[in-house]
Image (tube, rainbow, N blue to C red):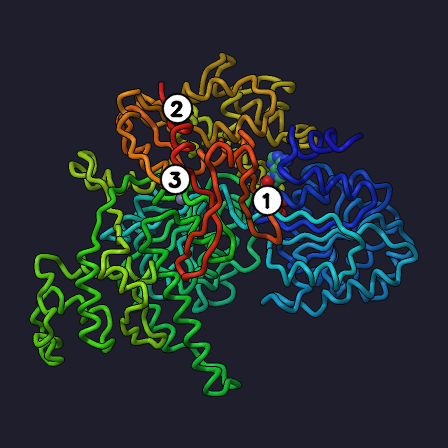
Amino acid sequence: MNKYEVLKKYFGYENFREGQERLIDAMLGGRDVLGIMPTGAGKSICYQIPALLFPGITIVISPLISLMKDQVQALNQAGVHAAYINSSLTENQIAKALQLAAAGRYKIVYAAPERLETYGFLDFARQAEISMLTVDEAHCISQWGQDFRPSYLKIVQFLKQLDRRPVVSAFTATATENVKEDIICVLDLHNPEVLVTGFDRKNLYFAVETPRKKDEFTLRYIQEHEGESGIVYCATRKNVDMLYEKLAAQGVAVTKYHAGLHNEERKKNQEDFIYDACPVMVATNAFGMGIDKSNVRYVIHYNMPQSLENYYQEAGRAGRDGEPSECILLYSAQDVAINRFLLDNKEENQDFTEEEAIAVRERDEERLRSMHYYCLTKNCLREYVLRYFGETGNGDCGNCSNCQREYESVDVTETAGKIVSCIREMRGRYGINVVAGTLAGDDRAKLREYGVAAYPSYGSLKDMTEAGIKQIINQMLIEGILEVTKDKYALLRTTDKAEKVLIGEYAVVMKELKKTPVYESDKNDRMRSGVSGSSKKRISDILNSRGLKLFEQLRSLRIEIAKEESVPPYIIFSDKTLTDMCVKAPFNKEEMLRVSGVGENKFERYGERFLQKIDEFTNGVKEKFYFGEWEEMQGNSGKEKGFAEAWNGGGGKAKMPKEDFYLTREQADQFPYAEKYLAAELAEQLNGLRNEERVKKVSGAEIFRRMQAEGYVKEKITDGIWKKSVSPEGEAAGLFIGMRESRKGTEYEDVYYNEKAQRMILEWFVK
Ligand code: ADP
Ligand code: ZN
């Protein structure tokens, strides 16, 4: 067998994903490798395929028992002999497993790092032919990360004790330079093939919502996603209990988890969730460690978390199978107060000196602030997160709530000037509430006490609401025109940039949600459309109503089989596989094998039962279970790709599908040429000219991709950071690299388009 045959036979996939092949080829060629890829990118297949092709055994070191169990179950389901050896087994079981392993019963053996130095394990490893040693979650070896595990250092000792050094492969999702160097150095990888793909989780849709009633919003969202699995994170136990009661009262199959529950109950609830008995979990951030449930379709944050680090980790539990999933943060101004309260009451580490304690507190405040700005920004959320973690995005991902909303730009420089004046008059003595109250000319007791009416700025923005003023102040904070003191009082101050605002050299532009008739006529609709911007990728947008019924039946069958085999349902077939099964509605083995994710072994086990279900449902009559727009995917040879594209493809909800972006000649003539635009700015200008009702938006990312395709720009990852460059042809076409300023005031490079390039791009779109 070759690698393609293995991919098809055991995993049911037709094509490799980006990067997988390169690593697999290197391992098969006897080289060490290091793969740094985000969760869901498909790391496991990278080492499992060579493992199946090597003559000997592959040992996989993994830190978490639950992860090992999951992987081994999945492999066994796929027809691969695999086992794990860790402390969840008795000594007898371990001895037995090692005996079988030494006899060559297993192709892949998972082990916890602590095992490596036990005599029994070493004995086995010396007897058997070990072709490869794979280190999963390899960042655990680095003392730089927060997940350092001293036991990982034992791997090196272990390798030295083998007669022949096997291929060593290491995988992680942590991409910092320090960690990467540590892995290569400490593990002593020999001239490894290193693959770093970005931090971006492309299958995740990010949204910030500000519903008036969070509980109603959540309930509604869950009901609209019935049958799908999701997690709702709350900041406090009290919130968890409250929301759990409310959802349960409405008949939602929900369970809960927090540190206040008894061990037994926690364990049971966790299992109910993993096995889809209760697909919805309401929990505090105590939940999630070591949970590898791969078909979580959404993560809702009922409250804003304390940092983007926390947020990205928690939200990242959605879509581990690489399928489209949604991460929705429900923001209210109160969340900031809750978090500050939590920080104030955080247990202090007794070992800290006072200085250290202050530094930690300041860092926490800073993180909270960055998190807060994430909730306020009107720009691309993905870009915001990536930049926070030191990568760059495209400025316009097209798959977050901000990229999908229609905003209008409003120049508020004059108002910003008044805010600057006010803060200067106050000499940085007050925070946002007092400043906004003063500008609005409010007369509440607190303000009277401070005597703010004496400031010349008092009431200078009295036509505005305090909330409106605060929005602009926040925007100014994000842009670095204002800053706040690092302590918890967060007193407002102006920066050097403020001067430029006063003299009109720097324009402050706010994005405001465009009011369309739909939004005004139906508030609920607005709520829905806010979220379901991404809904075009949901199952309900691919399958028609009959298709959804079939899907339900297949899902029940999946749960039934999962119970019989005592494995989680997602290990039988993924959601995507079931969806594709509805689309292809196979009637025989040959057709069934064409479904993405159905390999031969899975077919042998369950194929007939699923075929029978489909036969019952259709009475043997061919029928179309999906919307028309997906017709073209039938007969698509590149299965994984064809399906993924369709899945990610255009909106299925609208009766009249919108056309891809174009402009008429008359519209194009209105284009406001400028000295330079970024791709995202260019897209915004272009979108402003189109016929909104009939024509889809174009995104900066699309423009950029086209530039890539033309060979005008290149994007390369060095050290985990995307860098863009312009080719000579690109320069000739009018593209150039310029500096941009980030939120934190640091500069970075991006591609600009001059007037010549703007004309060229415009012409592409003229119909
Ligand atoms: P990671 O370990 O990087 O988080 P996994 O190895 O768990 O990711 O893979 C995520 C999902 O993607 C799994 O459901 C896996 O079966 C699927 N997958 C991996 N490679 C491919 C591929 N080439 N084609 C289709 N699906 C794939
Ligand atoms: Zn975006």
Crowd rating for badge 1 (residues with CA inside 10 Å; few <14, some 14–19, many 20+)? few
Q: Residue at x 51, y 66 (%)?
A: 263
Q: CA distance from mark 1 to mark 3?
A: 41 Å
Asked if disc 1 is less than 8 Å from ligand 1, the answer is no
In the rendered image, residue 278, in percent from the top left (x then y), is placed at 45, 48
- Foreground tag (1 vs 3): 1
Q: Amino acid at mark 3?
A: Glu
**Viewer can see residue 134:** yes
In-front residue for pair 312/553: 312
- Label 1 element class: strand
In the rendered image, residue 49, in percent from the top left (x then y), is placed at 74, 39
Q: Residue furthest top?
A: 621
The numbered dot on residue 716 is 1
- Foreground tag (2 vs 1): 2
The numbered dot on residue 226 is 3
- Label 3 element class: loop
Q: CA distance from mark 2 to mark 1?
A: 28 Å
- If the picture is divided into quarters, which one holds ligand 1? top right
Q: Is residue 647 left or right of residue 140?
A: left
Crowd rating for badge 3 (residues with CA inside 10 Å; few <14, some 14–19, many 20+)? some
Q: Amino acid at mark 1?
A: Lys
Q: Which residue is mark 2?
A: 763
Q: Is residue 106 left or right of residue 202?
A: right
Q: Residue at x 65, y 69 (%)?
A: 143
Q: Earlier in the sequence, mark 1 or mark 3?
A: 3
In the rendered image, residue 542, in percent from the top left (x then y), is placed at 43, 27
In-front residue for pair 689/122: 689
